[in-house]
Image (spheres, grey):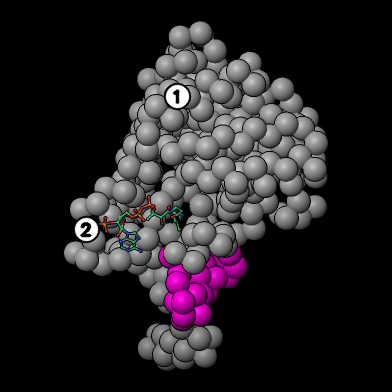
Amino acid sequence: MKYTQGMLRQDALKGKTILITGGGTGLGRSMAEYFLELEANLVISSRRLDVLKETAKQLQEKYGGKVLPLACDVREIDQVEKMFQLAIAEFGAVDAVVNNAAGNFISPTERLSANAFHTVIDIVLKGTVNMTMTAGKHWIGIKQPGVFLNIVTTYAWTGSAYVVPSASAKAGVLAMTRSLAVEWAKYNIRSNAIAPGPFPTEGAWSRLLPADLANKFDPAKKIPLKRVGEHQELANLAAYLISDFSAYVNGEVITIDGGEWLKGAGEFNHLEQVPDELWDQLANMRKKKS
Ligand code: HXC
């Protein structure tokens, strides 16, 4: 068995309908693909219906099952509510929501226009609020259990220079995840989050590591495990958190980053750069002193 393989039993998500925002491309698509393989019904949404339709077609051809592509800008509550109703009309219920849609760009903060800042906050935080309130109110109203899985990032709690709108918004999503995990547990609604480190995707990497930056700052080099993530690893974790196997996991954020963020935090972590010969010299000096 390898980490590049699917982890859960074949029918782990059978009978569940899962709605994934930003499900047409990137990590959203990879999670969707594995959920479908595990026999879930899927609703994938984003602003680009043509991309969604093509993804739905490809996934259905590969795995069978049913994938409903729905255009929706998560910033607009009317569009979110309409999408949710269309999903219910198609499948009878929605059992889980993956808040995955995001917007981000790198920039010195003082160079950002107010609208640029607002745009990222609106997609990431307001979009997650819109989706969460729509699904949550519905589930509570009809006494149906539900699961939220929110995709955040490790800089939701460390903060990060040059992606301040995204860091601010993701921090809000994380706070909401933990708050609702407690408040809505009585309705049998679980809320969890995943904080992925670097997982290569065309969309995020072309925006966050444009042009020569990808060569200059190879993300794998700063990961203690010396590699970037495989999409299947993230999909395995997401499927587990959606499935009933994680029924007692609530209010958790699980980091999957090869040790990246802690490497930046530990006081002496930079000593990794000390070569063996220097450790030998230091040991000899100590022995001579004693
Ligand atoms: C500075 C920028 C900019 C950039 C846009 N703007 N791109 N400012 N640097 N690179 C400004 C525009 O000038 C405008 O402000 C405002 O932002 C809105 O831009 P629009 O293009 O009108 O917005 P929109 O079409 O809605 O596009 C949203 C977007 C776009 C965020 C700008 O990049 C997008 O749709 N991204 C979605 C996919 C994505 O970003 N995925 C990566 C997520 S990765 P003015 O003032 O001119 O009107 C992630 C986690 C990373 O979030 C974790 C890594 C480990």
**160 is higher (above) or lower (below) than 57:** below
At 61% from the left edge and 32% from the top edge, which residue is drawn?
A: 43
If you read the primary sequence from the N terminus, does the residue marked by circle 1 or circle 2 appear first? Answer: 1
Secondary structure of the residue carrying tag 1 is: helix
Q: Where is mark 2, residue-wise?
A: 113
Going 26% across and 67% down the picture, which residue do you hit? 108
Residue type, mark 1 in image: Glu
Disc 1 Cβ-to-ligand 1 distance below 8 Å: no
Query: Does any atom of ligand 1 lie closer than 8 Å to the CB of label 2?
Result: yes
x and y percent of residue 65 in the render?
A: 77, 32
- Tell me where the magenta segment starts and ends, as one range: 208-228
Which residue shows up at 49% across the image and 66% down it? 206
Residue type indicated by callout 2? Ser
Can residue 36 be seen here? yes
Could you classify mark 2 by the number of other residues whose Cα lies within 10 Å: few (under 14), some (14-19), or many (20 or more)? few
Q: Which mark is residue 81?
A: 1
Mark-to-mark CA distance, 1 and 2: 30 Å
